[in-house]
Amino acid sequence: MSVILNIETSTQCCSAAVCADGEVLFEKIEREGMNHARLLAPFVQECTDYLKRHDRKPEAVAVSMGPGSYTGLRIGMSMAKGLCEALGLPLIGIPTLQILAVKAMFARYDWEGDEILVPMLDARRMEVYTASYDFSLKELEATRPVILEADSFVSLQEKYHGRRLVFIGDGAKKAQGVLNVQDNALFMPDIYPDARGMMALADRAMRSSEFLDTAYSVPFYLKEFQATVPKKPF
């Protein structure tokens, strides 16, 4: 397998990892707080220093494309592009929701194989970013924002009657107390996207030469950035 430097900054978790030969060789991760602007550059530097110490070079850079935090995605993409330009490397883009889906697959060993994977990212209030996949990662429903209501996924359950829905990610934590699909659903709220979880997807993209245009690629924000005005102190 190729040596790939993975960058993931779509949520509060900031991470970078060097992966090759089906394993994580080195990683740096911080799970609490939106500190990407401060942490990502040192994390990437430690990854490249590791490679130098072991006389290896990255062959590509993979970055999580979103959806997710507007600021986090922008920081991650800027760093990935800069590395690719400086080192002459191809750029790989990985959909964030697919990272959650793949991590869920590897988190258990008792799958039937016909489950429908529904990764969810918390998008504030009662909204989530979500999509639906089968176990081959075929997209059953496209990535979209969804307002969580009791019947939000009834149509999906009816369309694929009898197949278990698996809700994955921090958005699933909100969904668990709202959706009326609990009788035929599994909730996995403690799975989050990170750089090590990109390994299989990045390697697959590398083998098939699925590269982005380094100059013009942008993250998949899904929604435009909305600035908020801080409340004035009393």
Image: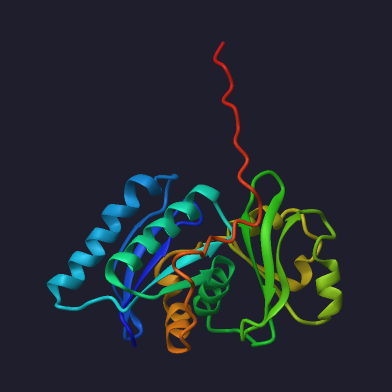
**Residue 165 in sight from this viewpoint:** yes
Residue 41: image x %, image y %? Answer: 30, 53
**Residue 191 in sight from this viewpoint:** no
Query: Which residue is depicted at the point 64% across and 50% down?
Result: 123
The one nearer the camera, 141 or 24, is 141
Residue 69: image x %, image y %? Answer: 54, 51
Query: Which residue is depicted at the point 45% across and 81% down?
Result: 200
Query: Which residue is depicted at the point 41% across and 67% down?
Result: 195
Query: Which residue is depicted at the point 67% across and 63% down?
Result: 130
Extreme residue toward the front, this view: 215
Q: Is residue 117 left or right of residue 14?
A: right
Extreme residue toward the top, this view: 234
**Which quadrant is home to the N terminus?**
bottom left
Q: Is 219 above or below relative to 159?
A: above
Residue 89: image x %, image y %? Answer: 34, 74
Q: Is residue 156 left or right of residue 135?
A: right
